[in-house]
Image: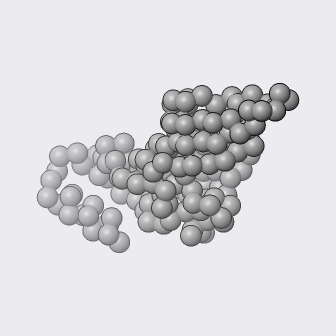
Amino acid sequence: MGIRFALRTLLVSSMAGIGVLLSFAAHGSSMNAVMSNQWALDGSSSAEILPSELNNCKLHMKSNSLRCKSKRIEKETMTADLVYEMEAEIGNFKGKGFTISHRRNFLVVIPTDMDNPDAKPVEIVEGWEAAQSVKCTMKDAVVNCKGPDGKNHLYSKK
């Protein structure tokens, strides 16, 4: 309701950019559902690429998208301890579907098993990784995103 009120206010107060506003209105309900919730990956950890306590997402009216930037995230994997930030753009809202383009900026990469000569080498390097894109659909309180690897990732409201 807040977004609809803001949209009407903007539309009444200014006719400039009316195409963008009308386009936003057409996709506002699915965008609003994504934006107005805190999401968790597989029902446990906070989502990195959807609005959650890990990131700050803002509406970008010009492109009808949400742009998110995360806090510093620390994660332990089997091969390395990582510290990174995530950027994501959520857009192309069509019905209950949308896409997310995201990338990580690795700030710290520390191999976990440096003393083991048989350990797998760490393939992550510090700096920005190439952007990846996932296609998502929303049904009820669940977002299902399919990555380029073909795996499904389920996000639910926290």
Quarter holding the C terminus?
A: bottom right
Q: Quadrant of residue 126?
A: top right
Task: Identify the residue at horizontal 33%, vertical 64% (top origin).
Answer: 3
In the displayed orientation, state which residue is furthest to the left. Answer: 13
Image coordinates for residue 134, horizontal then vertical, percent: 60, 43
The foreground one among 69 and 28 is 69
In the displayed orientation, state which residue is furthest to the right. Answer: 118
Q: Is residue 17 left or right of residue 72?
A: left
Task: Identify the residue at horizontal 71%, vertical 50% (top origin).
Answer: 152
Rendering colour mode: one colour
Q: Looking at the picture, does residue 130 appear above or below residue 27? A: above
Quarter holding the N terminus?
A: bottom left
Image coordinates for residue 68, horizontal then vertical, percent: 43, 49
The foreground one among 89 and 95 is 89
Image coordinates for residue 17, horizontal then vertical, percent: 23, 45
Image coordinates for residue 100, horizontal then vertical, percent: 53, 45
The foreground one among 41 and 136 is 41
The foreground one among 103 and 34 is 103
Q: Looking at the picture, does residue 85 appear above or below residue 34? A: above
In the displayed orientation, state which residue is furthest to the front. Answer: 115
On the question of residue 7 being in view, the answer is yes
Q: Is residue 102 left or right of residue 32?
A: right
Q: Is residue 11 left or right of residue 110?
A: left
On the question of residue 91 being in view, the answer is no
Task: Identify the residue at horizontal 17%, vertical 46% (top origin).
Answer: 16
State the count of labels.
0
Task: Identify the residue at horizontal 44%, vertical 60% (top origin).
Answer: 35
